[in-house]
Image: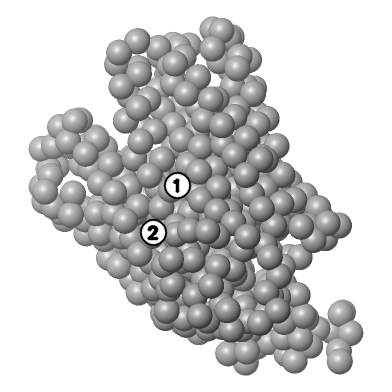
Amino acid sequence: MQSRSTRSRFRWVTIGLVVALIVINYVDRSAISYAVEPLEKAFGITTAQYGFISSIFSVGYMVFAFVSGPLVDRYGPRKVLLAAIAMFSVSVALIPVAGSFAGLLLVRLLLGIGEAPAFPAATRTVSRWLPARERGLALALCGGVAVAGSLLISGPLLTWLIGWLGWQGMFWTMAVLGIAWAVLAAVLLRDTPAASPRVDAAERAYIAEGQEAEAGVEHTTVRWRPLLTNRNLWVVAGGYFAWGFMFWGFMYWLPSYLSSAYQLSLKQAGAFSIAPWAAGVVGALVGGIVVDRVYRRTARIRSRFAVMGTALLLAGCSLVPLAISPTLTVAIISISLGVGFGFVTGGIWWVASIDAAPDQPGSAAGFADAAFALSGIVAPSVMGFIVSGTGTFTSGFVVMAVLAVGGALLMLLVPREPVARPDARSVDEGSPTTAGSA
């Protein structure tokens, strides 16, 4: 066998492709927010209608996040991702020529559908391409660093493209970028290391050595009963919804909060908004490193839940100063700590999904991602209702904190360790794969 120094490392090229896809995914979905004014002028839509256009994305995303998991498990991530990125790249390209409110609704719905498979496919890819001890960092890169990093770069990138090519050119450029990724992935991306000619025997053996027995099962048909009665998977979904409420709340409302509470211009609010997402990048990296190190020492699935629960608890507590009319400096520090601690969990949701249902990683990830998408529908509406009714954001921040603490308690108290199965046939027969299954 080759030494570690000469063993190929193509698995990280595969992970890099997935990270790049998620960055494109998030930049694409946020692009419309930088073209609100020209869209309203070009198509005669109102601000209220723009709100519906924003929400319809999350509706399509939520439904197909759940559906895409079984598709990934059935057909493999490569086929699903290539079809998905083709769909959402075409959808982005159609935005400038949608022509009307109804046209934009349809295009944004298709965009949500097209972007939904990204995380279920990323989860299955990581589960097949990496040993368990390396998954925390990899999924932190996918679910944390890529997400927070895309929010950091999207503003400067998209405004620069608008200034250079116009708002229509900005959308078309992003569509071309998606197609370019698809061409590269068609050449390099494979469902498993065994299917890739670029992975040597030593790397294949290294990956296989650190995987569960169930990882050898490929392109399976989803088994709904063990999935829907899996206790640990429901815990992941509940915790992810709690974190998602904070994430989407700040993503949609942070600039507005800073502008109204501290009389900042939009440009100033945008500048101050950078700090929380920068903290998110740091938090995601820390979370990936910590969860892998803790798991190496304990080899216990509950150790991952402990890291996530602690991070959510700290995130919720960090928001307490926002309830007492803080100064701008204190508010930025508080929000940055909340987002930073929250992003510690950024990639671990996917690791925990794999742990909960290792024989159906795509379906498990789709289940969790649907809970996150649901929070993307609920959070903006609840925050908007609170602000409209009270004139302040204070009660909204309280809801964020309470949900985060509740999610933390769920993560810390409820999960169970899986029961070892001496016969893998129990998996094929639809038996529960964890003690958290009913």
313 lies left or right of 269: right
Residue 274 pos. (x, y %): 56, 33
Numbered tag placed on residue 65 in the rendering: 2
> Residue, x 66% and y 82% (percent of image)?
423
Instruction: Say which label, 1 or 2, has the lower sequence index.
Output: 2
| Residue 410 marker | none
Q: Residue furthest front?
A: 438
**x%, y% of residue 6?**
84, 84
Marks 1/2 in contact by CB < 8 Å: the verdict is: yes
Which quadrant of the view contains residue 376? top left
On residue 372, which mark appears? 1
Per the image, label 1 sits on a secondary structure element best described as helix
| Quarter of the figure with the N terminus | bottom right
Residue at 69 percent of width and 57 percent of height? 417
Q: Residue at x 30, y 13 (%)?
A: 389
Pointer 1: residues within 10 angstroms few (<14), some, or many (20+)?
many
Q: Position of residue 257 (x, y in %)?
A: 44, 20
In the image shown, does 141 or 188 lie closer to the viewer? 141
